[in-house]
Image: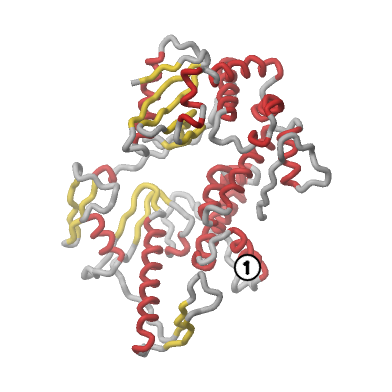
Amino acid sequence: MMLAAMQLTSGEMPIKNASWWQRLQQVTVYENASPTLHRAQKLLSGWIALADKLPVHDLLDHIYFEGDLMHRYTAALPVDLHETVRANLQALMEIALNVDAGRYPSLPRFLMELQELRQAGDSESPDEGRVGKVGNALRIYTIHEAKGLEAPIVWLLDANDTRRKPDIYNVLLDWPPTEQQPVHFSLFTDKRDPLRAHYFLADEEYAQREEMNLLYVAMTRAKQALLVSGQGELNDDSWYAHIAAAVANNDNPLLAQSDILEIHSDQKILKVNSALLHPTPTGQRAPRYAQHETASQQQGIWLHALLQHLVPADNSILNTVIAADKKSVLQKMCAIPDNKMDALWQQAQHILTQKSLQKFFAPQHYLAALNELPYINAQGELRRIDRLVEFENEVWVLDYKTGEANNPARHSTQMQEYRDAIQAIYAGKTVRCGLLFASGELHEID
């Protein structure tokens, strides 16, 4: 399904006989829509904005992650279909990687290709996704079959073999993506004449790039550990040789000079960081909020939601709403009861209008700002930073607190984790952390 964007202008009334997308925007702005519809409108707006900026595979990857598609599909289907659905979702990602070898990466071209595949015969249409979960067992795949799949431990076998099936006859084609027709087209056998030498050379270079792309696919199937093996004399052009050379030259960013050990095997020496010998933490999936929040916790959730939508960063929904309607629209979006909205609104406005805090909320004072920034910590757990604000020489991490500002030091561990995560991204800038309380007080945590 192709996404078509249409934005309502300020004060525009609902349109009769509207499309589903127009109707969705209408009900989320002007009517008492459910939180589910608000979520759908927000996600779709974000995906539409990315549709003409990202390659199809990257766009799908973004949608899968933000929409939590794997879990939502399985939650809506019988248990016996879970693995089949997961496999088919992964297969769609594989098609996005393979269509025309990336020659036409746009969304319209991808949809056209899918339509052609749907009309193709059984021999040409893509297979259903291969079910990947078979319990605690060893699975053996070709690299092409493994696209889209992952496993904690992956063993790349026979990586020292460079034998290829020779091309006895084939097509020699030079068709730049910007041209409407081929620059060169000819057939060849095992005898290669010198007049076409530069075309053969270009074809060989392309084949080598594809080999490296395939190697990338093979190596990135591993979640925690990758084992690479080969046999016989080392072939300089083999995948094993490329990987060994990168490790020996410390080209791998995972390797640290300060912590290196040597492993001897079959007269070959590989240098490996000992940290890579330990499983990477993956954390456990847990609901973002407890099922039974206290009144104070629920109050904090509502205030966080108001601040998230009131300050610049991601205001795609509110930027078409006139100021008089903004309060009512936000109340519906955040599902705030009538008897709570006025007090929460005043709290949010009190924070946002503090003169001492303007540098964090007025766009003219900073370079960039992000709300609800997600990241994965060292334990593999998903964390979110309430607001990140970037200035010329420093970056501020703000955490909203609804309680009393009587003991800010008890949040030091949490803020230090935020600082470490953001410092890795903004290596050249000072990272400062602050607790912003509902009273409007800002406490910097050193």
Location of residue 348 (image quadrant): top right
* Residue ID at (67%, 36%): 320
Counting from the top left corner in percent of width and height, residue 391 is at 41, 32
Q: Secondary structure at mark 1?
A: helix
Residue linked to disc 1: 117
Counting from the top left corner in percent of width and height, residue 310 is at 59, 28
Colour scheme of this structure image? Answer: secondary structure
Residue 236 in sight from this viewpoint: yes
Residue placed furthest toward the front: 364
Q: Is residue 337 left or right of residue 303?
A: right
Residue placed furthest toward the top: 406
* Residue ID at (35%, 32%): 393
Q: Please, is residue 350 above or below residue 99 in the view?
A: above
* Residue ID at (42%, 33%): 390
Q: Is residue 242 left or right of residue 310?
A: left
Q: Quadrant of the C terminus?
A: top left
Residue 131 in sight from this viewpoint: no
- Viewer-side residue, 178 vs 302: 178
Q: Is residue 42 left or right of residue 29?
A: left
Q: Please, is residue 12 above or below residue 146 in the view?
A: above
Indicate the amino acid at tag 1. Answer: Leu
Residue placed furthest toward the right: 16
Q: Residues within 10 Å of mark 1 (few under 14, many from 20)?
A: some
Q: Is residue 307 left or right of residue 274?
A: right
- Viewer-side residue, 320 vs 90: 320
- Viewer-side residue, 243 vs 177: 177
Count of marks placed on residues: 1
Counting from the top left corner in percent of width and height, residue 283 is at 43, 36
Q: Quadrant of the N terminus?
A: bottom right
